[in-house]
Image (cartoon, rainbow, N blue to C red):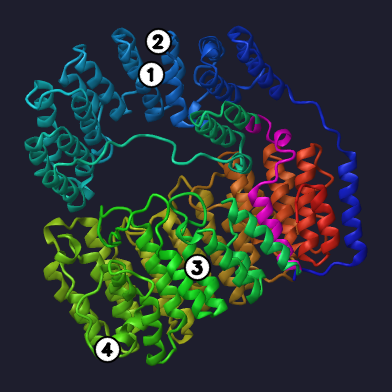
Amino acid sequence: MPVSLTDTQATEVVHRCERALAGITERSESSVLRGWRAAIEAARDGDGVRAAAALGVLPEHPRFAATIVLGLVFPAVLVATAESLDESLTVKPEALDWFDCCEMVTMMRWAESATDLDASVLAAVCARSHGRSAGLALLAGMRDRLNRDDVPAAALLHSYIPEYAKQEKATAAALLVIRGHLTADDAIRDAKGFGVIQDGREEAEALSSALAEYVRAGLRPDDDSVLTTIAAMKLWGDDRVPRDVRSYGLAFGAQACVRAGWLDHARSLAEILWDFNNKEPVLAAIESGVGQPERIRALHQVPTIDDIIIERTDERRLEAATARALGRFDDHDSEGALESLTVALDSGYAAADVVTPADRTNWARSLAAGGDQDTAVRILDSLMAAGELGPGAYSIPLEDLDIEHQRAFVVAALMHGLATERTESGQSAPPAAIELADIVEQIGDPELETGLLRATAALGSHEDASLPSLARAAAGPVFRTTRIVETLRILDALHRDDDDEASVRRFREWGSVFDDAERPLLAAAAVAYIADLGSQQPQSVRPECLGPVAAELARRGRLDDALALIRGVGPDDLGGQSPEKLHLSALLEVARASDSAEFKTVNRALNKCKSSWNAGGRDKADRALHKYYIGAIALACGDVDRALTAAAALPNVPYRGCGAADLAIDIAARMDAEPAQWTASRAAALIEALRGRGVRAENLVAALMRFGASTVEHYPELDSALTGLRFIFGNRDPGDAALVDAVAGLGLVRAGHTRQGIGRIAEAVDTAQGKRHHSASPFHFAEVVTELPAAMPERADLLRGACSLVRDSYNVEAAIGAAHRIIGLADADDLPLIAETLTDLALSQEYTQSVQNRIGVASIRHGVDASLLPLESATEPAAVRRHVRLAARFLARRGFLPEAKRLGALAGLQT
C-alpha cells in the first residue's frame, strides 16, 4: 500500500477535483479545429476553393496532414487543396518534411488518387521529404500516371525522385524502360546512383526492384532489358562484402524470376548468393516452382484513437491520425477517417470525453491495489471481451490480486482466447501465454496449467497447424511454436523440485493436450521429459528444445549425456543450415546449469561440434559471436579470468547482448554474487575490457552504470583508469564523456572519499550543461545522483542540476522521453524536487503537459500526498477530466474507494 493518507486529506482531494470540474467551461473550439471543421463542410459541398481557404488557418504540419486526409475522403477538393498547400509552402521550401506528420502509406495512396492534379504540383508536394519517403510517394503517383498512359508526367515525377532513393529511382526508371522512354542501362545507373551506400545492399535491392518490374510487365526472359539487368546483378553480387548484405537484396530478384517461371535466370542468380539464409529460400522456390510473393507496402496496423492520444508530440499524433484515417477510409468509414484527424488536430478538446482502454486498465489496477479486486477483475474481463486490454494489464494479477482473483483473471483470458494472442499490438510484444504462465505459476493449480497449455496450442487467427522451428532461418511464422515452447518452460520450471514420479505423471498429463505433430515440443518441459525417459539417453529433440533438455541433463549430473546430445545435432536437423549458433547457445545453457562443468570439458565438446559447422559460410560477425560464447561459457564454468581475457579481446559483435560490454557486465554480476571473486587485478581487467575495439559509446554507458562505480568503490586507486575511458565518447560528445566522471565520483563517495566524490559529480553535471547528449542521457546523470545517500546535503542541488540537463535534449520529443525516464527513478522523497525542476524548464506547452501528466501518474504510486496532482494547472475540459481520473486512481490505491469511485464516475470511469 502506498504512503498512508488521512480522511481529511482524502476529502480535500475530492473537493479540489469538484472545484476543478465546476470551474471548467466547454470552451469554444480552437481556430485550428474550426478551420478543419469548415474545410470538411466545404468538402461535403464539393467546394474546393472554400475548403482550401479554411485549411489556410492551420499551421504547416497540421495543414499538410489535413490536406492529405481531406483529399482522400473527398476527391473533388483534392486539386484545389493541394494547389493551395503547394503555394503556401513555396515561401519556405525547406521548412516542412511531410514524413514528420504523415504516414507513408497514406501519402502514397493520396499520390495515387491525385489523378487530376498537375504533375508538377504533385511532384512538388511529394518531394517535400527526404530520401525514400519522397521516392515512394513519387513512385506511387507515377504508377497512376502510367496507368493512364501519361508518360511525360511520369517522366517528370521520375526526375524528382532523389538519387539516394535508389530502389524507388530504379523502379521508376524500369517503368519508363517498359514504355520505351528509357533503357535498361538508365535503370541500372539509377540503381547504383552517385556512390555505394554502406556495403551495397540498397543497390542490390534496387537492381532486384527493376527486374521485378520487368517480370510484372510480362517481358520475355530473353528481352535485352532482362538480360542486361541480370548481368549487372551477377556482377554486383560477385563481390562478397561483410555480412553478405548484397545477397539479401539480390535474392528478391531471384524470387521474381521464379514467379515469372524464369528458372534458368533464378538458378544463375542463386549461384551468387553467398549467405545460406538468403540462398536456401531461393533454392526451395526453384525446386517448387513457386516464388515468394511480392512485398507489398501496407499499414502494419491501424492505430486506435487511444494510440493517437497517447503519442508524445503533435507530429507523432498527426502521423498516427493519418494512418488511422487510411484504415477507416479503406473500411468505408469516411467519418471515422475524418474523426482521426480531428483528435490529432486538437487532442485536448477532442478527447475530452474519451476514456481509453489504458485509462480503464490503470483504473482496474488502482482498484485492485486498494482492495476492490472484484470490480478490478470485472473491468479487466470487459476489456478482454472487447480485445482492449491496456499496456501492463498482465502485471496486475501478479502484483495486486489474490489467488482467487488471479484464477478468475486467467479463466477469463482463456475463455476470450487470449492465450494465442500477444500482450499488445506489434510483432515485438511477447505472447500473452507467457504472461499467463507466470500467473498460473503463482496459483499452483495443475488443472489450470493443463488448461493453459491446451489454450496455448490452439490455432490463433491466421494460423495453420504447422510448427516451424525457431532455430531455422526463413522457416515461416514461428509465433505459435514460440508461445508453446516458452509456456512449457515456465510451467516446467515451477516443478523443478518435484520427484521423478510426480514429473512423469505431469508429463503424461500434458502430453494428452497435444497431437502427434505438437508432441515433440513437450521436450521443452525438460524436467518432466527427462524424468519420463529415466536413465535412457534422448536420441534427438527438436532444435528449440535442445538447450533446455541438455541443461536439465547437466543439472542432474549427466554432463556427458548433455554434451553428446548437443554434438548429435547437425545440419540435417536444420534443413542444411549450420548448427553453430544452436550448439553455442546450448553449450552455454549446459555450463550455467551444471555444478561441475569445467571449461576444458565444455570447450572440448565445442571443438568436436565444429566439424558440422559451415566454415565457408562464416563471416567476421559469426567468428566474433563465437569468441563471445567462449568467454560466456568460461564465466558460467567459474573461470572468471579466462572470461575477462575473452572480453578484452572481443571485436565489435553485431548481435544484441553479445558484445564485450555485455560480457563485462555479466562478469561483474558474477563477482557481485560472490564478493570474494573481486580482486584489484580483476577490477582493472574489467575496465581494460571496456577499452577494447569491441566497445562503442552506446555500449559503454550500460557497463558504466552497471559496475563503473563498484570498481572504484572496491579499489579507489582505479579512479584514473575508469576516467580514462572518456576517449571512447570522442571530442564530439563532451556531455557524454562527463558521465564517466560522475560514475567515478559515485564510486569515490561509496569508498568513503565523500568530498572528492561529490566534487567530481558536481563538476561532471556542470560540464554536461548546455551540451547535446548522444549515448548518455540526462536520465543517467540523474540515476547516478539518486544513488547517493538521501541524507547527503549536496544531493538535492546535484539532482536539480541533473534534471536540468533535459533542456539540452535534441528536440522536444527527446526531452519528454528523458523527463519521463527521470520521473520513473523517483521515490516518495525525490518526486517533489524532480517534479518542480522538470516542470520549471517549460520547454514547450506539450512538454509541460506531458511532464505534468507523468508526474501525476508517478504520484499515484509514490506521492506522499495529493499536492503533485496537477488539478489546478489544467484549463481545458479534457485535461481537467484526465487529471481527475488520476486523482481517482490516487485515492483508490490508498483504500479510499467510495471517494475514488465518486471521482471516477465524474471523469468517465465506470465501475
How far apart marks 4 and 2 lie (CA) works out to 73 Å
Along the viewing direction, whichever of 72 and 658 lies nearer the viewer: 72
Which image quarter: residue 664?
Answer: bottom left
Along the viewing direction, whichever of 354 and 884 lies nearer the viewer: 354
How far apart marks 3 and 4 lie (CA) works out to 35 Å
Q: Residues within 10 Å of mark 3 (few under 14, many from 20)?
A: some
Amino acid at the residue labelled 3? Arg
SS state under label 3: helix
Q: Which residue is mark 4?
A: 558
Image disc number at residue 119: 2
Q: Which circle's residue, 3 or 4, is located before the other in the chain?
A: 4
Q: Which circle's residue, 1 or 4, is located before the other in the chain?
A: 1
Asked if residue 478 is positioned above or below residue 198 in the image, the reply reads below
Left or right of 591 in this view: 833: right
Amino acid at the residue labelled 4? Arg
Number of numbered tags placed on the structure image: 4
Q: Which residue is mark 1?
A: 141
Q: Residue at x 80, y 43 (%)?
A: 880
Q: Which circle's residue, 4 or 2, is located before the other in the chain?
A: 2
Q: Residues within 10 Å of mark 1 (few under 14, many from 20)?
A: many
Q: Which circle's residue, 2 or 3, is located before the other in the chain?
A: 2
How far apart marks 1 and 2 lie (CA) works out to 9 Å
Q: Residues within 10 Å of mark 4 (few under 14, many from 20)?
A: some
Residues rendered magenta in the picture: 343-370
Q: Position of residue 520 (x, y in %)?
A: 28, 72
Q: Residue at x 40, y 64 (%)?
A: 457
Asked if residue 826 is positioned above or below residue 848 in the image, the reply reads below
Amino acid at the residue labelled 1? Gly
Q: Which circle's residue, 1 or 3, is located before the other in the chain?
A: 1
Amino acid at the residue labelled 2? Ala
SS state under label 1: helix
